[in-house]
Amino acid sequence: MICIIGAGVAGVMAAHFLSEEGAEVLLVDRSSVPASGGSGAAGAFISPKIGKGGPLQELTNEAFAFAQRFYRENFPKHFHGDGVLRIPKDSDDEKRFELYEAFNYRPYERWDAARAEAAGLRNVPGGFYFPEAGDADAPEICRVAAERLNFRQMEVERLEFAGNSWRIIGAGDLIEAEHVVLATGYESDLLDLRYMGIRGLWGSRGDYATSRQFPISLHKDFSLSSTRHGRIKLGATHVKSPQPCRICDGRPLATLEAKAAEITDTSDFRLVETFCGMRSTSRDHFPIVGPVIDVPRMLAETPAITRGAKAPLIHLEKLSVLNGLGGRGFVFAPLMARSLARYILHGEALDPRVHPDRLFWKWVRRMEN
Ligand SMILES: Cc1cc2nc3c(=O)[nH]c(=O)nc-3n(C[C@H](O)[C@H](O)[C@H](O)COP(=O)(O)OP(=O)(O)OC[C@H]3O[C@@H](n4cnc5c(N)ncnc54)[C@H](O)[C@@H]3O)c2cc1C
């Protein structure tokens, strides 16, 4: 049995693909329902990355192409493919859009100010409209997926490797598993994962009742969804914080409301519900997918690695991680989870761009300083 710790979108998707490939899985979370962490707060916009090209944009857009098809096929009620309009953040960004266009995900349409105005926007110079993009109902996707899986509530306190299997230990509770997948989001204290540089960024989202009918979603330095059942979602994640933010009094939304009011008429928006959550980012902003290095053992057996000595990497047996999905957890999770499942079950090679090993040597050599 494979035990997945953490029932956010990373853990749920890992469990989904492992189970689809025929493995027996158990998904555990400290909460009685999936998506109680960052995944429940997400606006869950599924859109491509724009920019001047490069490996992160390429990877994101591969993941986007996979994700939008995956959600359409598997969660048709909870993916809303109304398209997303990417708007420049300011006049400098507007100039950069000229450079970005050559690297755009396809299909896309170039909108001008008149086209944006026709869609109910003001002070918007235009942008890139991605018709395959959209947004998902974040908690519902996690919960619907988890209903098809074995799920158990448990706060995991400790992990011990006992010869050939893992002991997953909570208060008065014990699970034995042949393989463990750690999908705990910004919380990474069950093992020594310091080399991954996982840190949290928190953000908030407000759901507003409105009579306005937005036909599309849009993204600037905040995101605003199309209207569905008389509601829109407004959100952003930008605040660096080592501390969890579980209760949000809604104040951060005031800034977002002001920004939204600059580009459209928000006068009848009425805040119905507020969500906040942490998302986790890796040191290099790429996802972290694959085996975990046994850091205490490596430091004990070859202390000179902190001074530049070479040594073969030692990995923890039968344990993998899926984390660092950043501000695009719902974009990355399906493709990353599928490759992790194929790695665990069939030994398929992992994409070096997301392999956790990439983060080790730089980190360990900095330990001396
Ligand atoms: C406000 C906001 C807006 C966002 N908007 C978007 C967006 O538009 N598009 C997009 O793609 N992404 C978005 N994101 C990012 C996305 O939500 C995250 O990347 C994603 O949720 C990360 O999922 P995760 O499963 O790694 O972490 P989480 O969802 O945080 O899940 C981790 C889970 O692990 C559990 N856990 C941790 N430790 C333990 C333990 N010891 N024992 C048991 N359980 C444990 C927690 O309870 C939690 O349920 C947004 C995030 C926020 C906060």
Image: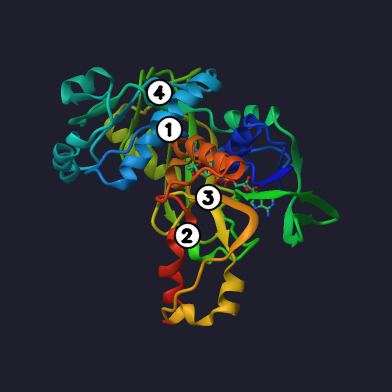
Secondary structure at numbered mark 3: strand
**Which of the numbered marks, if any, corresponds to residue 168?**
none
Distance between the alpha carbons at the discs numbered 4 and 3: 29 Å
Distance between the alpha carbons at the discs numbered 3 and 2: 13 Å
Seen from the viewer's position, the closer of residues 343 and 201 is 343
Residue with the most extreme right position: 172
Distance between the alpha carbons at the discs numbered 2 and 4: 40 Å
Q: Quadrant of ligand 1?
A: top right
Q: Are marks 2 and 4 in contact (CB under 8 Å)?
A: no
**Which of the numbered marks, if any, corresponds to residue 226?**
4
Name the residue tied to disc 3.
Answer: 323
**Which of the numbered marks, if any, corresponds to residue 357?**
2
Residue 111 appears left or right of 22: left
46 w.r.t. 236: above or below: above
Percent position (x, y) of residue 292?
A: 57, 58
Q: Badge 3: how crowded within 10 Å, few (<14), some, or many (20+)?
A: many
Q: Sequence order check: which comes first, mark 3 or mark 2?
A: 3
Task: Please tell me whether mark 2 or mark 4 is closer to you in this view.
Answer: 2
Indicate the amino acid at tag 3: Asn
Q: Residue at x 34, y 46 (%)?
A: 56
Q: Residue at x 32, y 34 (%)?
A: 261
Q: Sequence order check: which comes first, mark 1 or mark 4?
A: 1
> Looking at the image, how many numbered discs can be counted on the residues?
4
Q: Sequence order check: which comes first, mark 4 or mark 3?
A: 4
- The quadrant of the image that shows the C terminus is bottom left
Q: Are marks 1 and 4 in contact (CB under 8 Å)?
A: no
Indicate the amino acid at tag 1: Phe
234 w.r.t. 108: above or below: below
